[in-house]
Image (cartoon, rainbow, N blue to C red):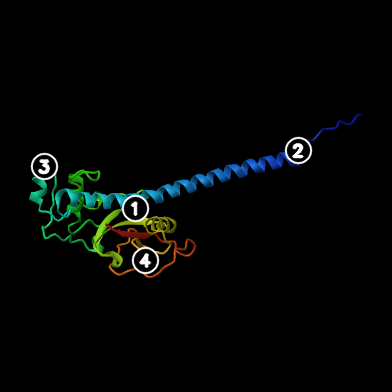
Amino acid sequence: MKSVKYNQSGFTLVEIAVVLVIIGLLLGGVLKGQEMIENSRIKSVAADLRGISAAYNSYVDRFHAVPGDELLATMTGRGWTSTVGGNADNVLAITPAQAFTNAGEEPSFWQALRGAGFIAGDPAAVGVAALPKAGTTGLIGVAVGPYGLTGLSACTSGLTTKQARGVDTIIDGIDQNSTGDARAINGAANPLAPVAAAPAATAYNETTIVNTWTLCRPL
């Protein structure tokens, strides 16, 4: 009886190397894509905060008044579908604790900017649902004097450590969250109300700080 020999073929070292190179390229492309998406989100948040600042200053320039502080009658007299107004004392009453609850004169603030067409959204919207959303899906609110900043500031919540550091660097050009125009603080709550006191000099560290950040910058 003749024995039958079977030829067994396998991958050569060259073929295995080619496969590994292809896998490496694919993984590199995925990681690069994720990095681009994250950078886009960071730039979007910075743009969101700049947009609120531009809307605020444009309103002051057009109406010679602080948005949100004008009387309801003044706002509805312009034909806006406003439901709330301020007390016309030329000072916005919005505490840091009210930034993400849309309380105090904040509802009037957002309705004024929307009524004037400076930001998108329903001018008659009220409550937390009326707060704009950042590019990272966190809330955007305003408050007077958060983190020791002077005057009215725009704040955004729910940032990761990398996002907070990136936005801070775009605004200030430095990598420190307790100095400059942009200031951030880390905490378990989301959104974390921006307290009145300036945050401690907490280093951005993605390995030891896992909770979300709230970041504010002056308008």
Residue to which mark 1 is pinned: 138
- The first of marks 3 and 2 along the sequence is 2
Write the residue at 18% across / 50% down. 61
Q: CA distance from mark 2 to mark 1?
A: 53 Å
Q: CA distance from mark 3 to mark 2?
A: 78 Å
Write the residue at 76% across / 38% down. 10
Residue to which mark 2 is pinned: 10
Write the residue at 30% across / 70% down. 197
Q: Do tag 3 and tag 1 residues touch (Cβ < 8 Å)?
A: no
Dot 4: element: loop
Residue 25 lies left or right of residue 142; in this view the side is: right
- How many C-alpha atoms fall within 10 Å of the one at disc 3: few (<14), some, or many (≥20)? few
Q: CA distance from mark 4 to mark 2?
A: 62 Å
- The first of marks 4 and 2 along the sequence is 2
**In which quadrant of the rendered view does residue 104 lie?**
bottom left
**In which quadrant of the rendered view does residue 147 lie?**
bottom left
Q: Amino acid at mark 1?
A: Gly
Q: Amino acid at mark 3?
A: Gly
Residue to which mark 4 is pinned: 179
